[in-house]
Structures are given as structure tokens and as C-alpha cells.
């Protein structure tokens, strides 16, 4: 395991670069189309406070154990049980990387050559592991901010539409804000195990969720209020302005692909005998091959469902930490088996409900959170009340 450590700013560079992306802007954009400005701001604040609280629960344990996300899976499930989780996470990360690469390749006159070029660039940028990602994001983050600021000023003279709120419950927007950062929360260990201390890691997530995410989502709200913003697709809307928007989409797609391939390569390295570089080559080839087809059009529902594997793992870890009073003692074999059964059961329920359009709460993220935390607390409740772990 690398002895490399990252400062608060280095960690923030990486995460803010990943947050400066179309999906996070789209969250604010959707909020702005359905809620008043006051409601939007309240939803963003509440949602990101919840995310920040979840991250702060994670940070002491991450630094204490110095483990990646998949290492936590091995800790909770045992080595054999963690393979199921790893399979779902790697499939999801490769799939979403393929979607990003497909979108990036569409900016080239020859999409096949575009896929090859962008896959090679992303693979090279990720080759030096966390050190390479830090250096790349130190370059890309200022460019992303500059392109976003240019878009902001280029639209400053546009007319602003006054929006009357729709008859939607407030929790819809709050869930959107939480969902926007949930992937970051559940993969925090992969990146924040390199933090210099718990304090520096906590400072980074405070900057991320209390400053960066609200500002980026706020930009999406602003775009939704422009008179020209009648499109429901924010990517098409951005392209109405100028080439700077295409530069932003290109850079944000590259950052997202780098982070996804890095995480997938770490998972493969931890669960197989392959080195990080060999794992990176494998996932890059898989993502590049899938990028040659419009995977988003045909398999987005499958990928969204498989992505639940990382959310289940994250909620399991958080629930285990809370149950054990902000600590993470080693589970025994019986507990590892129970965790495996919980993981498989919840995956089966979510897949069944997703493809049959059945929902418990109306939102996939909330369904996962309620089911996973509910099972964990019911199982550990007797020992918690007795003040000792079973």
C-alpha cells in the first residue's frame, strides 16, 4: 500500500474536479425547473448537510484503517464475499466510463478514432495512480472553473424567467441533492485514505459539500431560469452558447473517466493478483470497447441498477460505524456471513423492484438506504441495547 499522503487542497482538487460535471449541474437545473428559488436553496443546503454529516462519520474510520472502498467490503464480508461486491462495482464503473468516452468521441469527426484517442489519454492520465490524478486535476480544475465562469458571464445579459413552484414535495429536491453526491460518499475511502490526517480529510469534505456542491448546483439553477433554457437536456442547452461549453463538457468527461477507471483498477488490484497497471489496461480496454456502441441508450437501466452495489456497501459501512459508536471493530465470521446475505438480498430486491417499477419510497437511493440500514439496525439492535457487540 502506498505511503503517499495528500493535503486537504490536493484531495479537494480531485473531488471538486469530479463534481464539476454535467450530472451535478443537471441536479440544480432540474430543481430550478420545478421549484422556486427559495425552495431550491433550502433543498441544496439540507441535502448537502446530510452528505457532509455522512462523510464526517466516515473520515475517522477511513484514516484509522487506511483502506480503500473494496478493502472495507473485504473487512465486512470476508474475501470471498467481497468478490460479489467487486463485480458489481467494476461493472458499474466500466459502464459509466464507457458512456463518458462515447460522449467524448462524438466530438470527433470519426467516433472510432475519437474513442481510441480519449481512452489512451484517460489511461495515461490515470497510470500514476493517485499522484497522477492529483497532478492532472491541478491542471484541469482551473480550466473547468474558467470555462464555467465564461459560460456564466456569457449568459449574464440573458433574460431571467420567474418560476412558479410545481406541486412537488420538497423532499424530491432534497433527495436529488443527496443523490448527486452519494457516489462520492460511498467511494470516499479509495481517495481519502491518502489524507494527511483526519482533520485534513474532514476539512476537504466540508469544502466539498458545503461550498463546491452548492455552488455547482446553484449554477444549474441559474441556467434553468434563463429564457433560452426551455430544453430539458442541459447538455443540449449548454451547446447553444459557444465552443467554451464543449470544452467544459470535454474536460469534465475526461475527469469523470479518470476517476472511474482509477477506482475500478484499485478494486481489481485488491481482489485479484493483477497489478494496478494491468488492471487499468483491462478496464480501459473494456470501457473503450463498450464506448463504440451507444451503451447509455441500451443499458442505462442495467447500469443504474448495478451501481446500487456501491450504495449498499456504503450504507452497510456507515450503519456498522454508527452502531458501533463511531468505531469499526472487526466482525466475526457469523457477522460477515450475515452482511453477505444482506447484500445479496437487497441487490435482489432492488433489481426486482427496478425492473418491475415497484418502489418503497419513490426513489432508488432512499430504497437502498431504508432497506440496508433497517436490516443492519434490526440485526444489531439487541447487542446495541446491551452495550456490547454480538
Image (cartoon, helix red, strand yellow):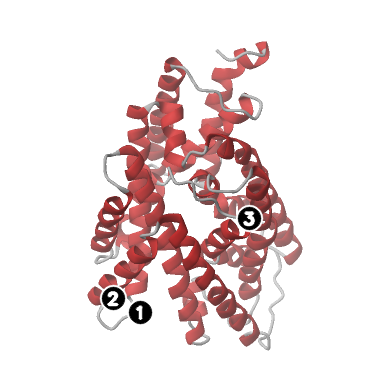
Distance from disc 2 to disc 1, alpha carbons, whole Å, reads: 8 Å
CB atoms of marks 2 and 1 within 8 Å:
yes
Residue toward you, 247 or 170: 247
**In the rendered image of this protein, does residue 82 appear above or below residue 12?**
above
Which of labels 2 and 1 is toward the front? 2
Residue for point 62% across, 79% down: 149
Residue for point 58% across, 15% down: 389
The quadrant of the image that shows the N terminus is top left
Distance from disc 3 to disc 2, alpha carbons, whole Å, reads: 35 Å
Residue toward you, 79 or 152: 79
Q: In the rendered image, which residue does mark 3 sit on?
A: 8
Q: Which mark is residue 114?
A: 2
Residue for point 41% across, 47% down: 307
The tag earlier along the polypeptide, 1 or 3, is 3
The x, y position of residue 311, in whole percent, is: 48, 42
Q: Is residue 166 in view from this perspective? A: yes
Which of labels 3 and 2 is toward the front? 3
Q: Is residue 360 in view from this perspective? A: no
Q: In the rendered image, which residue does mark 1 sit on?
A: 107
Of all residues, the one furthest to the front in this rendering is: 3
Q: Which mark is residue 48?
A: none
Left or right of 13 in this view: 103: left
Q: Helix, strand, or loop for circle 1?
A: loop
Amino acid at each position: 500500500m502506498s505511503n503517499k499522503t495528500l493535503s486537504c487542497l490536493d484531495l479537494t482538487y480531485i473531488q471538486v474536479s469530479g463534481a464539476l460535471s454535467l450530472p451535478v449541474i443537471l441536479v440544480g437545473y432540474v430543481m430550478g425547473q420545478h421549484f422556486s428559488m427559495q425552495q431550491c436553496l433550502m433543498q441544496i443546503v439540507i441535502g448537502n448537510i446530510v452528505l457532509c454529516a455522512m462523510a464526517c462519520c466516515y473520515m475517522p474510520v477511513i484514516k484509522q484503517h487506511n483502506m480503500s472502498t473494496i478493502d472495507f467490503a473485504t473487512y465486512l464480508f470476508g474475501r470471498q464475499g467481497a468478490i460479489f461486491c467487486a463485480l458489481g462495482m467494476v461493472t458499474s464503473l466500466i459502464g459509466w466510463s464507457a458512456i463518458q468516452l462515447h460522449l467524448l468521441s462524438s466530438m470527433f469527426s470519426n467516433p472510432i478514432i475519437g474513442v481510441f484517442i480519449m481512452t489512451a489519454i484517460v489511461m495515461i492520465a490515470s497510470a500514476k495512480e493517485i499522484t497522477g490524478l492529483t497532478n492532472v486535476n491541478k491542471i484541469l480544475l482551473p480550466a473547468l472553473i474558467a470555462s464555467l465562469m465564461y459560460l456564466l458571464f456569457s449568459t449574464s445579459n440573458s433574460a431571467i424567467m420567474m418560476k412558479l413552484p410545481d406541486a412537488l414535495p420538497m423532499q424530491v429536491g432534497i433527495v436529488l441533492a443527496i443523490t448527486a453526491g452519494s457516489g462520492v460518499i460511498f467511494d470516499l475511502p479509495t481517495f481519502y485514505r491518502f489524507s494527511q490526517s483526519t482533520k485534513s480529510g474532514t476539512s476537504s469534505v466540508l469544502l466539498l459539500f458545503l461550498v463546491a456542491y452548492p455552488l455547482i448546483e446553484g449554477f444549474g439553477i441559474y441556467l434553468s431560469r434563463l429564457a433560452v433554457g426551455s430544453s430539458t437536456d442541459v447538455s443540449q442547452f449548454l451547446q447553444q452558447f459557444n465552443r467554451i461549453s464543449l470544452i467544459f463538457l470535454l474536460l469534465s468527461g475526461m475527469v469523470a473517466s479518470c476517476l472511474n477507471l482509477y477506482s475500478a483498477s484499485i478494486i481489481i488490484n485488491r481482489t485479484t493478483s493483477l497489478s494496478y497497471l494491468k488492471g487499468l489496461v483491462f478496464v480501459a480496454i473494456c470501457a473503450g470497447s463498450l464506448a463504440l456502441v451507444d451503451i447509455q441508450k441500451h443499458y442505462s437501466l442495467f447500469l443504474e441498477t448495478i451501481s446500487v452495489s456501491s450504495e449498499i456497501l456504503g450504507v452497510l459501512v456507515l450503519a456498522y460505524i454508527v452502531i458501533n459508536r463511531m468505531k469499526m471493530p472487526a466482525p466475526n465470521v457469523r457477522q460477515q456471513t450475515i452482511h453477505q446475505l444482506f447484500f445479496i438480498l437487497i441487490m435482489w430486491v432492488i433489481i426486482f423492484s427496478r425492473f418491475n417499477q415497484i418502489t418503497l419510497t419513490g426513489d432508488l437511493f432512499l430504497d437502498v438506504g431504508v432497506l440496508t440500514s433497517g436490516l443492519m439496525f434490526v440485526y444489531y439492535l439487541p447487542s446495541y441495547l446491551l452495550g456490547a457487540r454480538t
